[in-house]
Amino acid sequence: MGASASHRSAAAAAPVPESPSQPQDLVLTIFGAHVRRSGTQVWSGGMVAILGELGFTTGAARAALARLVKRELLARTRAGRHAFYSLTPRADALLAEGDRRIFGFGRGAANDDSWTVLWHAIPERDRVTRSRLASRLRFLGFGALQDATWIAAHDREREVRTLVEQLGVGPHVSVVIGRMPDGPAASMVAQAWRLDDVLRRYESFLSDFPDAAAALWTECPPRDAFRLRTLMLHRFRGFPFLDPELPRAIDPVAEIRDAVLARFAELYAALEDGASHHFWTTVAGGRPGDQGRRARGRVQSTDIASRSPVDCFARDVAGP
């Protein structure tokens, strides 16, 4: 059913970039963090300004928004001279699924010694579906043994059933859940995942978002808080694609993953008020009437905007 190991898909092993390179990806990260639960529309001019602060030109920002509309992930409406964007139901479902994976990452059942193996026979001509399946499997912690043979630690049956149904590939997919009494061979782990790359990226994350500065994060000016929190979340989103969360007995990155999870949770919460204040103040600027007032009022603290600058390591965190 699958090709030989030597023909393993290069895409399956390709590392995820450490710094964001596509404004479309950042727009979805931002909408997931700030917009999804509220269902609010956001002003196009504000989103262009937000992306400009993250290093993208006006042209690149507007093109990214237009492409997301074309992909049916954003909906565009007009009110007078202003345009506004909101998430489509499809994007909302994808971001909700992503949130469950991202914020549940590293918190699975520690004693689950099951393994999930998936084979598929999706025709070569259906390259788009094969690519989508591969990307979504990586996000669930799967690694490729061959082009059409994937393996993941733990019981992933529920997530795989949902994925197979969404992609409509049920007739082409077989899944087995089982145990390996002695664990997988080291060569199998090395073929399916690049754990040396995972370790390097975790070390880089801890270096870019240092614990010594934790007390300062809550005092970041809102614009810095937004930039740092967005880039941190965007970086963290890549880890489920890379780290298979192996059973701890054979997991060489378990301890550093725990440190990354703790750092992310602490700083993500510490930066929330300032980041939210900056985002809603910026994107609500074009909305007439009380919609903009409600958006700007989402953060109740009255002194956030007047915070004095502190060293929030804003210059040291990689942007686009």
Image (spheres, grey):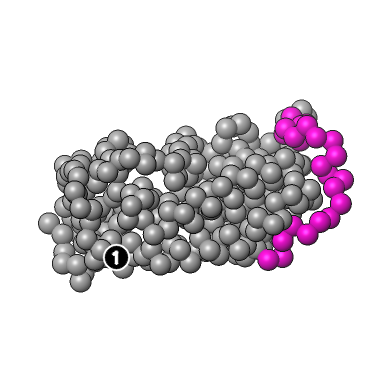
Query: Which segment did they paint magenta?
Result: 292-316
Q: Tell me where residue 227 sits by quadrant.
A: bottom right
- 80 left or right, relative to 39: right
**Left or right of 284 on screen, residue 29:** left
Residue for point 49% across, 56% down: 256
Place of residue 221 in the rendered image (x, y in percent of width and height, measured from the top left): 79, 50
Magenta region, main secondary structure: loop
In the rendered view, would you say 66 is above or below 281? Answer: below
Image quadrant in which the N terminus is located: bottom left
Q: In the displayed image of the protein, which residue is found farthest to the left?
A: 1
In magenta stretch: residue 265 = no
The answer to which of 166 and 61 lies nearer the viewer is 166
Tell me what residue is drawn at x 81 percent, y 42 percent.
304
Q: Nearer the viewer, residue 283 or 267?
A: 267
**Residue 159 visible (yes or no):** yes
Q: Is residue 5 left or right of residue 137?
A: left
> Vertical placement of 91 versus 152: above or below?
above
* Residue beneath the point at 76% across and 28% down: 290
* Looking at the image, residue 233 lies above or below residue 165: below
Residue 317 image offset from top left, x and y in percent: 65, 63
Q: Is residue 311 magenta?
A: yes
Report the amino acid beneath label 1.
Answer: Ala
Residue identified by numbered label 1: 190
Q: Is residue 230 above or below residue 205?
A: above
The residue lying toward the viewer, choosing from 211 and 28, is 211
Q: Position of residue 140 (x, y in %)?
A: 36, 47
Q: Position of residue 318 (x, y in %)?
A: 62, 65
